[in-house]
Image (spheres, grey):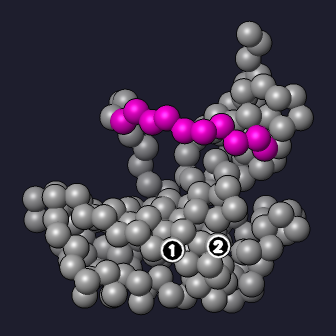
């Protein structure tokens, strides 16, 4: 299990890194050395924002939380990561051969519900990323794991760039551009 801790505008000492690593140890027994955690800590006035990104076999889980205490924010962020995995439990179980790294973890985790976070309504960030070939079902699963309302991906069957999105009625839509 690889853990990278980065303080943006704040110094992250060895003691804090050890405490964060201790909180993430529970993932090691399920995901082993395949898991790669990236932790970013941002101070925002009196509040600390913690972002944790977990990468597993081309799958990305991401959560963030804000709190006055860094360790409390880490605890809340770890809980959000666990809930993301729980929310995807039924889909993952249907495709368990592709997600064997989650199988053991899901056996030990109880089902709980989480409140949805509010979405931003303006462009606040630009990103570039590598397109990963995947099927439509994998794209929907990845979108839900990230907690996004859409996902741009490379269709493994057609070899073209597609967009899968969540509709207001709870179903999914697929955009297949021609170019």
Q: Which image quarter: residue 16?
A: bottom left
Residue 34 rendering spot, x and y as whole percentages: 64, 73
Name the residue beneath numbered marker 1. 2
Q: Nearer the viewer, residue 145 or 90?
A: 145
SS assignment at label 2: helix
- Whether 86 is drawn above or below 40: the answer is below
Question: So how many labels did they put on this image?
Answer: 2
* CA neighbours of label 2 inside 10 A, class few (<14), some (14 to 19), many (20+): some
Question: Magenta segment, which residues?
Answer: 125-134
Q: Quadrant of the N terminus?
A: bottom right
Determine the residue positioned at 31% across, 64% down. 6
Determine the residue positioned at 76% across, 41% down. 133
Q: Which mark is residue 34?
A: 2
* CA neighbours of label 1 inside 10 A, class few (<14), some (14 to 19), many (20+): some
Q: Which mark is residue 57?
A: none
126 inside magenta stretch: yes
Determine the residue positioned at 82% across, 29% down. 159
Residue 39 seen in the figure: yes
Residue 143 rendering spot, x and y as whole percentages: 64, 48
104 inside magenta stretch: no
Q: Which image quarter: residue 93?
A: bottom right
- Whether 178 is drawn above or below 33: the answer is above
Determine the residue positioned at 43% across, 43% down. 119
Q: CA distance from mark 1 to mark 2?
A: 8 Å
């Amino acid at each position: 299990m690889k853990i990278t801790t980065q303080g943006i505008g704040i110094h992250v000492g060895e003691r804090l890194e050890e405490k964060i690593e201790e909180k993430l140890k529970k993932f090691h027994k399920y995901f082993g050395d395949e898991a790669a955690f990236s932790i970013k800590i941002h101070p925002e006035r009196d509040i600390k924002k913690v972002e944790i990104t977990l990468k597993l076999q081309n799958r990305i889980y991401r959560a963030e939380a804000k709190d006055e205490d860094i360790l409390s924010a880490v605890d809340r962020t770890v809980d959000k990561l666990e809930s993301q995995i729980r929310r995807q439990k039924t889909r993952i179980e249907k495709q368990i051969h592709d997600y064997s790294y989650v199988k053991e973890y899901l056996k030990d985790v109880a089902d709980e519900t989480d409140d949805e976070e509010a979405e931003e309504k303006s462009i606040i960030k630009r990103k570039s990323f590598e397109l990963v070939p995947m099927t439509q079902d994998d794209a929907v699963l990845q979108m839900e794991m990230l907690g996004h309302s859409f996902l741009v991906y490379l269709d493994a069957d057609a070899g073209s760039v597609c967009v899968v999105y969540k509709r207001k009625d709870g179903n999914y839509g697929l955009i297949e551009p021609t170019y």
